[in-house]
Amino acid sequence: ILPSSFATAMPESESSLDVLIVGSGFSGIYNLYQLRKLGYSARIFDAASKSGGTWYWNCYPGARVDSEIPVYELSLPELWKDWTWTERFPGWKELRKYFAYVVDKLDVKKYISYDTRVVSAHWDSVSDRWTVTTDTGVVVHPRFLIFATGFASMPYSPAFKGLETFEGICHHTARWPEEDVDMKGKRVAVIGTGASGVQVIQEVGPVVKHLAVFQRTPNFAIAMQQRKVTVEEQKRRKEDGTYPAIFRRRLQTPSGFWQEALPKPFASATPEERFLHWQQTWAQGAFTFLVTNFYDYAINDDANKEVYAFWRNKVHARVTDSVKAELLAPQVQPHPFAAKRPSLEQTYYEVYNQPNVTLTDTSKYPIEEITPKGVRTADGVHHEVDVIVLATGFNITATITHIDIRGRKGKSLKEKWADGVYTNLGMAVSDFPNMFFTYGPQAPTAFSNGPTCIEIQTNFIVKCIKYMIDNNLTFIEPLPAAEEIWREQIWETNKAGPWLKAKGWYNDLNIPGKSIQPLNYAGGVGKYAKICEEVGQKGYEGFTLV
Ligand code: N01
């Protein structure tokens, strides 16, 4: 029996859905739209109160995307033709407006249940359907299940001693209150200097009374070069064919953006040519500096050192205090450039020129405890603060495994992945029939532009579901042998780059106690798209179809 609140949101007949999708960010909505277009009964459950996925949860001060538009949007003409942005890199408020526009324009809002968190999904081998339960008490029985939950939806907060005793305000960036926290004139601590930390710091630095930044590893942040974009320029780019060309092009490049690396090695250019190239790409902003670099810059030690030196000079030219400058961009390179994800920044480094901003190196002086009044570090300093911002990242695999998902053998996905992630194509897992996930582990995910990766995966999943239904097949799941091969691919493609040479969420090492495993397919988006297409063309090679 369905609760009455649910009955009004969804006809009872739909409790036996063709497809249930979890999450209404880019991927959930795109899947929903494509499946509904084919006539299937599909519905989204989302724990959030509005669509947007990451842009619903990440509403901390300064949160904005660091992929530029129109690369960072869905390629459906019915959407982009009538939508205009105000900034090259939109902030979370504008992104949320975009999502509201998307669900209205595609007319799919009626198929989304908000404030509905999926707590378990168990495969029922008698009915060959999933039994999905939610925190609102709703139970549905879809044939197919898609976790469109992304990679960064399970916040990670380190187990700092005394954290619960803090008497001030403390939030993780990905659980920031929508009504915001007024930080004007307050003493604020920001722990972590990844993408989230950098954005908070540059946003609140100018307004707080005191800012205490706790950095464990410097972020090799590069220039965003944010600017306003006009309606006219967007109209022109739509009419002259630039938009559709970008959407096609982004499917072919390694990173899912529209540019790609110089087809020549670092050593083929003189130091002057290299310097001028980097000056030019730096000025263009976005990830151009990285994406259009010499193709071997990340793996050739000499090249990497020279790129680092170029970047370090840029930072030192902006930070007046030499001690802070050295902490932010040390002489000894902490890890290869691109081994961790660099942020895009606007005024991040200028914040450190303020006399009321302190920077503590927690690799040298770890946080010993959080006290009722602040943060105590191993150098004996007690930093009294009113607000603590935990910009400490995400537990990537827990994004999916925190849900009690049980497959054919009754084993949970968490148990299945206890000794490592095994998937085929970063989308499906053996023993978990008719289940897919998007923008998660073992896909191009963090090495790609989100919407690009998501569209490739959605096209694969939707075609696969259609194939199953058209051919009267009951279930599909990967062959364990195919998962072994795919995991090997993940390792091999990562060994060819710098990513295993730093400790972070790219390789699951940001969570204490975990073992190293690369979490992203590093063979490139273009190649990934081809592999997915070929698997489909070969009747889902590497999968069992029953
Ligand atoms: O998380 P992170 P994030 N003591 O894991 C530190 C996307 N995103 O939320 O590097 C002290 O990168 C940790 O230190 P270290 C984007 O893909 C995008 O910032 O491990 N410090 C690190 O500095 C992004 O890359 C956008 O040494 C501790 C920080 O916390 C990804 O999400 C915006 C610690 C965590 O950084 C994750 O970014 C936001 C401890 N015990 C997020 N534990 C945009 O589009 C952790 N740290 C712009």
Image: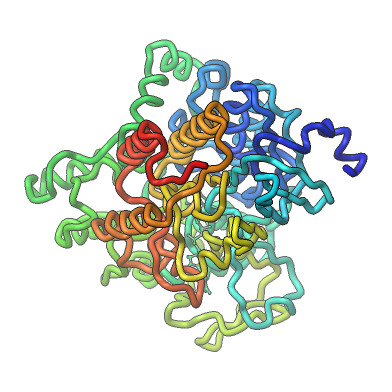
Residue that extends furthest to the right in the rendered view of this protein:
4
Q: Nearer the viewer, residue 184 or 441?
A: 441
Residue 544: % across, % down: 46, 46
Q: Residue 452 occupies which quadrant of the picture? A: top left
Residue 489: % across, % down: 31, 54
Residue that extends furthest to the top in the rendered view of this protein:
239
Residue drawn at x 92%, y 40% is 4
Q: Residue 242 occupies which quadrant of the picture? A: top left
Q: Residue 276: in sight, yes or no?
A: yes
Colour convention of the picture: rainbow
Q: Nearer the viewer, residue 291 or 1?
A: 1
Q: Residue 72: in sight, yes or no?
A: no
Residue drawn at x 43%, y 13% is 236
Direction from residue 518 to residue 386 in the image, left or right:
right
Direction from residue 164 to residue 499 in the image, left or right:
left
Q: Quadrant of the N terminus?
A: top right
Residue 380: % across, % down: 55, 88
Q: Is residue 479 above or below residue 16?
A: below
Residue 39: % across, % down: 64, 22
Residue drawn at x 72%, y 51% is 118
